[in-house]
Amino acid sequence: MAVIGYGTMGRAQAHNLRRSGIEVVVGARPGSPRRELAVSEGFRVLDTHAATAAGDPVMLMLPDEVMSDVFASDVAPNLKPGAALGFAHGFALAFAGVDPGPAHPCFLVAPKGQGDMLLAAHAAGGGTPGLLAVLPVDDAATWDLAAAYAGAVGCLAGGGFVTTFDAECVSDQFGEQSVLCGGVIELLKAAFDVLVEAGYGRENAYFECVHELKLITDLIHAHGIDGMRRRISGTAAYGGLTRGPFLIGDEVRERMRGILTDIESGAFAQEFLARSDDPATGTRAMIANEASGPLAAAGRDLQARLDRFTTRRDSEQSSGSNES
């Protein structure tokens, strides 16, 4: 099995495959720090073209913004005849212009969890649910391969769910933009700003609007929306049920529909690929700009203090100290 790319998800799946008894070769750029990490962790590491030529199947775990170029230059010319291609995300086939052609069956195994989480869960004997798709869609052998791969990396814990490359990609991006990495973050920023502007301390604002988000998401993850409502205070439940719809009304839903349309049409993909490396308006520039904002600054300060407390408490517990 060739795993091309050793980022967070590539590393996790390479380790899980090896733990499952699969022989793994990692493909990585010469001089890359991630290449050195793969070597230090005991993998056979080759340049991308050589790893591609050695593997069947070949799992492409590269960032979306470089997938098309690397596929054209290093992967496509070096694939074994009939070698299968695997993907952890549908973007490459749905929007990035990667076309393996009919000679190479393709499968998608998309873990519903971040790479480090998948690695830790598999090491503990578990895993995450996974979304599975194949091309051609009626190829039983490729479905068998997808299911076997999903089982080996830990993506059948909780079930393997059938989808398509396009559906996985669109729904994944929509969830990221409208909720997980977009909507929720902007909601946190806005709530923090409103409290601080009204004269409340930034500690109050951070703890009540940001820090406690994990408490709610953990309850939802474990017990569902209704289970979460039953486990919080009556005041919190009533306030959320009555003010939440006031905050997220029809106007927000209409904007979400616009976001979905941009994703489905490919407009977002074109914008992302064109701007991803722009030094002024690309992803890194926007991350740096956000990091200079008041919420990020408050988070760094408070989290550092919480981490020091946790470290001290753990040290005291390990030494048997009873001091408070």
Image (tube, grey):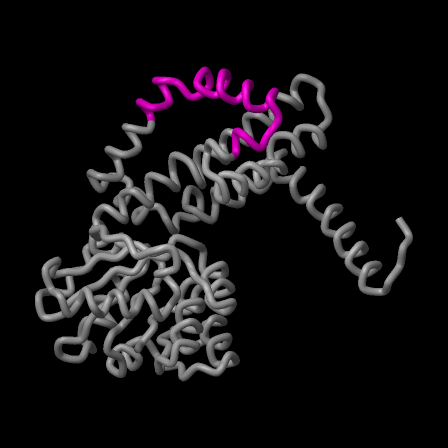
Query: Looking at the image, which residue is at 54% across and 30% down?
Result: 230
Quarter occupied by residue 205: top right
Q: Count the labels in the image.
A: 0
Q: Is residue 82 left or right of residue 195?
A: left
Magenta part of the chain: 228-255
Q: Position of residue 140 (x, y in %)?
A: 13, 66
Q: Position of residue 154 (x, y in %)?
A: 39, 65
Query: Looking at the image, which residue is at 40% across and 68% down?
Result: 13
Q: Main secondary structure of the magenta part?
A: helix
Q: Is residue 260 left or right of residue 21?
A: left
230, above or below 62, in the image: above
Q: Position of residue 211 (x, y in %)?
A: 63, 38
Quarter occupied by residue 138: bottom left
Please say whether residue 88 is one of the residues in the magenta stretch. no
71, above or below 270, in the image: below
Query: Looking at the image, which residue is at 28% across and 28% down?
Result: 257
Please say whether residue 233 is one of the residues in the magenta stretch. yes
